[in-house]
Image: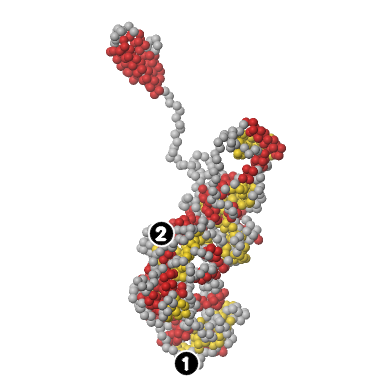
Amino acid sequence: MVDAAAIARLRAAYSDELARAATAADVQALRDRYLGRKQGAVTALWREIAHASPEARPELGRLANDLKTHIDTTLSERRAALAPSKPSTPRLDLTLPARALARGSRHPLSALLERIEHIFARMGYEILDGPEAEDEYHNFEALNMPPEHPARDMQDTLYLAHPLATRSSHLATLLRTHTSPMQIRYMETAQRPVRIIAPGRVYRRDNLDVTHTPMFHQVEGLVVGEGITMGDLKSTLIGFLRQLFGEDRPVTFRPSFFPYTEPSADIFLGCTCRGAGCGVCKQTGWLEVLGSGMVHPAVFEAVGYDPERYTGFAFGAGIERLAMLLHGIDDIRLFYENDMRFLEQFPS
Amino acid sequence: MRVLVSWLRDLVDVPVAIDRLAADLHMRGFEVASIEPWHGGEVDDAVIDLEITANRPDCLSVAGIAREVSVLYDVPLRLPRPPASPDRAPALPITIEAPALCPRYVGALAEVSVGTSPAWLVNRLAAAGIRAINTIVDVTNYVLVELGHPLHAFDFEKLAGGELRIRLARAGESVTTLDGQRRTLDPQMLVIADRDHAQAVAGIMGGHGSEVSLGTRVIALESAYFQPQSVRRTSKRLGLSTEASYRFERGADPDAPLRALLRTCQLLEQLGAGRLRPGVADVQPSTLEPRVVSLRPARVGVVTGLHVGPGAVDPAEFERILVGLGFAVDATGKEVWQVTVPTWRVDVTREVDLIEEIARSVGYDRLPSTFPALHAPPAPPDPRLERQRVARDVAVGAGFAECVTFSFVERRAALAFADEADLVQLANPLSEQFAVMRPSLLPGLVDVVSHNRRRERRDVRLFEIGARFTVRGGETRGLALVWTGAASPQHWSGTGRQADLFDLAGVSSALGERFGVDLVCDPADIPYLVSGRAAHLIMKRNGAADQSGTPETDATVVGVIGQLVASVAEARELPANEAVLVAEIDLDRLGADIDANPVVRVEPLPRHPSVVRDLSMLVAADLPAASVRGTIRSVAPPTLAEVQEFDRYQGRGIPEGFVSLSVRLTFRAADRTLTDTEVQDAVDALVAALADRHAARLR
């Protein structure tokens, strides 16, 4: 006679057999044995329950139904677990090198020029561009350097064999020895307060060696207005140098001589050796980084500014020199050799 | 200027240690090149090597430095005071024939016995970097270092006629200078001559013919002032620079000649080496009036930022500084002082020069730090710089390494890229290697490719932005690109493809796009590029030309693109069998009147679907794709949104001389969905036109 205990025994027997089912065929055999429409054990249970007493029938029906659901679910689960899985996505060895992008690089000189331009642009400076082939007037005379001026010795000039007509409609006879001619051209037409920097290539008749090249880069700056003093020069250039080299670097000013400024000052940056003395600063603890001064009244006169009303300061730096100090480069020729092993150390 | 500290101490008290003295001089504007311990006599002695700027010839002497030290530490200066010579008729006849070039000539005779100098003198000269020769020469050199004034001694008995004439050289005249060189003079050069011959190049070097020797008994001493420009010019012409010319060309003290001569005689007597013959000649065709410069003490503040006046810097301090430096100050006018400039200060000509003297002595570190106020907004950056920046961004983004090469190149390298007549030559090049201005950026870049190839770099992508120079074009700014080797970086997953001209054209297209124009290739013959693999780069505005079907309007040649001919590559040591792809773009023309940062105006996004049709056709192999595209554009209705070539095939199944070209046509209208029929009509019309104009057959 069927009763609750018999159903429980059947359930336990099923659990044992399920635990032993290792293949899809075992699972199918189990399904046939328990749930088969003719010989299935649970199917047979239903037939017996039909003969049970009417009072016992609902409870036994519920238990049999639970068992059927249990077997159905667990068999499906087991079958899914045993089913052969779909072919998996092939494994990638992600420790292999990536496919590199073709990365370009900015030349350290133009990268530094751009950085300097940004620093001055933030201080409200206009950035100039101008011809590299110049005339004597803009390169020398207007800068207080008449033809026999000894200062012309300081910068041996490369001259063109024949005057060159240029798009900016001047007759060039030489390669500019500094970027100051741009400032002269600017002031000739501006006739008002100015705040400019003039970056670019300049040329001197220097033979190639560890610290000289016949072509190099400069940035020069000029601020003209009413009430501009040497104090303004000091804080501007201290600020510039600290933005470039770091806030903790000391800066000092020393009297110097340039034909186009008076008073003139050389500006020194404290060396990274912090005064201990090293090869870079030649044991002095200081690095000469900028030339500067108050605009010479003769320069104002040459461009038609009233030197009583206006004062101003000018400054200039060699970009190669700054780049060598920044990047620890000890041979200027590296900039012009363009060895890719060098260039690629400055990724963009 | 090498300054021996013990010598300096003869002229001024030095109240500090040598290191401190050097540091203080440094901060006064005399850059210290080196400090060298000196063991010549005194203990604790040193030579401080100072760099004297071109404006301060007065400091090319121990006395000049001593004067700076006296102001620096506010201590008295003790300059030598040689006794005056009795006023007699000049013993040496002197005639100045060129008074403009020699405003003053002091001369005298002295009986001498030439020997060797005492150790202390030899030591001091050695410290100054001068080799001792004999007592006479040594004493003149000693005075040169001490006072900064150059002198010269002639062997009087070798002077024909026993006289000196200061005159211009005669045409073809020559003189053998003390260094043994025979020098041919030109008639603009000033010489010191006897009755017959030049005996010295004035202010530069004496002549061999009247050189003082051990047998010399009487010397003619010269202490003169020569015009700086004249000495400078002659020195340059002869390629001869001496201690004397170095000082004269920067400007000697016109008041020094007599003093320097008397000091020389005083030393000769002290050494027992000579005795002045009374009667010093002092020929001065014109007298120099001392310069007087006005100074407004308040102006010192205007220029330096110092606060001048009560409670701040006292103008009396300015006066002390100027007087200490040898200026005579008349401060009776409170607002405006009259300052007389000492004759040795050739650099001081206007008020600002006095202000510098004051600022330098006060010390730059004492000037206040202020920041200049902005009174107007800054102007926008120069558009040329913006264009360069954009071009640089595009090239770097495309994987190119930026180079900077010299603007001058070898003539041979330049000739590959320009005619001889178009080359801009240098008058005084450093070497053959740098003889002409580059007509193009390419010769420099090609050499850089070669440099890197020799260093095991096979894949090279380089660019440069810079100026080019030609006689016809003047100075222009360009961008050049060079590409050789693989199209993409090497990877383990496969063998890379070599870069081709379509890769490079992709970079120029991207550049054009960035400027808001189309840069398209127009095949052309260019001497340095392989025929059939060369094109001009043509600028077309905004793709507008392409849209309207009139492709040739508003087109300008702005550059070239192609494969470098093997002969040029080989000449620069590149392998001939590997393609070197180059492009060069004129950034002045490309950007002449267009914005480097064009403002984007947004097109509405399509709201209706597009219809795509692919056409594959057989056309003649030499028919440019641009012609096919042009025909399609000219016939198609405005609904043709895009034409894209997607396949080009030659080979099996394609007749000889033909090519199969496949294009994808995308039709779209902004306001409706296109019907099949209207698209088919458009395609039919296209096909008919292609058959008609190019004998194209659909496949």
Circle 2 sits in a helix, a strand or a loop, which is it? helix
Measured from the top left, where is residue B356 in percent x and y?
44, 72
Task: Choose between B308 and B17: the one closer to the eye.
Answer: B308
Q: Is residue B504 above or below residue A255?
A: above
Task: Choose between B284 and B214: the one closer to the eye.
Answer: B284
| The image quarter in which residue B642 lies | top right
Mark 1: amino acid: Asp
Q: Is residue B401 above or below residue A88?
A: below
Measured from the top left, where is residue A225 in percent x and y?
47, 65
Measured from the top left, where is residue B604 in percent x and y?
55, 40
Residue at mark 1: B87
Residue at mark 2: A242
- Report the mark closest to the observer, 2 or 1: 2
Q: Residue at x 49, y 44 (%)?
A: A101
Can residue B61 be seen here? The reply is: no
Q: Residue at x 47, y 50 (%)?
A: A347
Instruction: Name the mark on residue B613.
Output: none
- Quick one: quadrant of the C terminus of chain B? top right
From this viewpoint, which residue is outermost toward the bottom? Answer: B88
Circle 1 sits in a helix, a strand or a loop, which is it? loop
Q: Marks 2 and 1, Cα distance to the nearest angstrom?
A: 65 Å
